[in-house]
Image: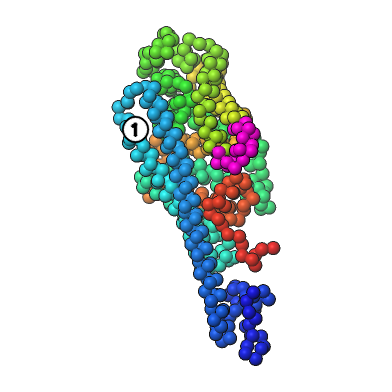
Amino acid sequence: MSPSRRKANGSRCSCIGEINGIAGDDSGESFDLSCIHCNGSDWIKTDLSTYFSSDDSEKLRRIIVASIKGFSIGTGIKGGLALFSIVARFARRRSSKSRRTGDFSNSEAIAMGIKETLRYGLFLGTFAGTFVSVDEAICSLAGHQRTAKWRALFAGLVAGPSMLLTGPNTTHTSLAVYILMRAAVLASRCGIKSKRFGSVCKPLTWEHGDLFLMCLSSSQILSAYILKQESLPSSYKSFLNKHGGKDLSILQGIKDLASAKPFTNLRAIEKYYKSVGVDIKLDPSMKIPCSMIHGGESCTKHGLTFFLQAYKRALPVYVPVYLIPALIVHRQDLLKKQYSILGKGLLGTARSSLFLSTYCTSAWASTCLLFRTLDTCNIPLVAIATFPTGLALAIEKKSRRIEISLYCLARAIESFFTSMTEAGYIRPPKILRRADVVVFSVSTAIIMHCYAQEREVFRSKYLNVLDWVFGVPPPPPCEET
């Protein structure tokens, strides 16, 4: 408790009241430096200097901690992906025992992985540090209450260009579009609970909207997988080629047939099937691609055999997806509830693997069914046949459906606009060289605004991560109710 502020004659000082927002003693008094009695007190000077130095050090601590935590998340995520890629690379090399022309050596791949990991760490570390710095600077200069409604929006916008640290010539269209989708979801949730926009946003509350988005995304993604793979990011293209389970020569044959072009590689398809023990002769005048898709098998038998193979391919994908978070999130309960945690992880792995294998199997089954029914194959039918494939998402847990559908929607949008741009229907503005940075910055501005002003629209797990990184301080005491 601070001493009572009285004059030499024992009367109270006249500067009682809250001035400059600095709290006084337990009686609620505050200190005015313009008062000759307060200003002349050594203990008051010491108390005020301690107040300001501790406040500034807390702000600096928050900036440093946010930067470190952002860096750790960036290096953890990218480093984990790089490690998985390197391990998979070693496994492929060991099985093939040959090196393709133009492929990187193992040492080059490791060096590249480390470089990308550090870049992503700097990106997220700088983003977190910049956001907190701008937030604290505005709060100090213009006040907490006066800037509360727009401060996080502006800080998120300023922090967005940190994406350039991943490489000045490296575009991240997929990431930018995905973050934009996340921002749109949060904005729609804000609109739903708003009295002004609630009626407009009501259709967004549709229970099965995630399945519809997945079907819409599947139509574009799987059509691009068959007809125009160059519109897809290289990493995603590799993922589809692996889990699609078809040789590139088969995809080229289907593309030729759907585009009504002469076949250019029927011999290559026959050679591929011969290498796996199937001897077939393809008809150049075929109307439907079933013989190219599954060789000498019937459509039904192919569906069953393909599903089993697809499930085996899917399991290694989801084991780390469920295992790593379990080790991190439930690390304290591993010894007490190891069987419960392990059981949930195994169930989640089996369920998600079932989704992916069903998704891939239904893609080929639906195309075969539609082509056989109509006895023709063309580009519109490819898009129509792959639309219902997205219904496989219903196998996943409800909480994961929206995440997967938004991720696929971001990929679909990128593929669609890339195709439209290459076809000449869309001309990108010459003045805007890094549209991905602009989209990312606007999106992070919306997300951080919702984080500061509409926290209830976030799911708890995301809110916990954001709170852990940014450590946004609570409102001042005068704002608490």
Question: On the rendered structure, is 351 left or right of 141?
Answer: right
Q: Nearer the viewer, residue 174 or 79?
A: 79
Q: Is residue 38 visible?
A: yes
Q: Nearer the viewer, residue 476 or 429?
A: 476
Residue at horizontal 50 percent and vertical 17 percent from the top: 376
Is 333 a magenta residue? yes
Residue at horizontal 58 percent and vertical 75 percent from the top: 20
In the image, the segment drawn in magenta is 327-345
Quadrant where the N terminus sits is: bottom right
Q: Residue furthest left?
A: 101
**Considering only vertical position in the picture, is 195 above or below 257?**
below
Residue at horizontal 50 percent and vertical 54 percent from the top: 66
Q: Position of residue 477 (x, y in %)?
A: 64, 66
Q: Residue furthest bottom?
A: 9
**Considering only vertical position in the picture, is 15 above or below 315?**
below
Instruction: Identify which amino acid the numbered label 1 is placed on.
Output: Asn
Question: On the rendered structure, is 67 left or right of 37?
Answer: left
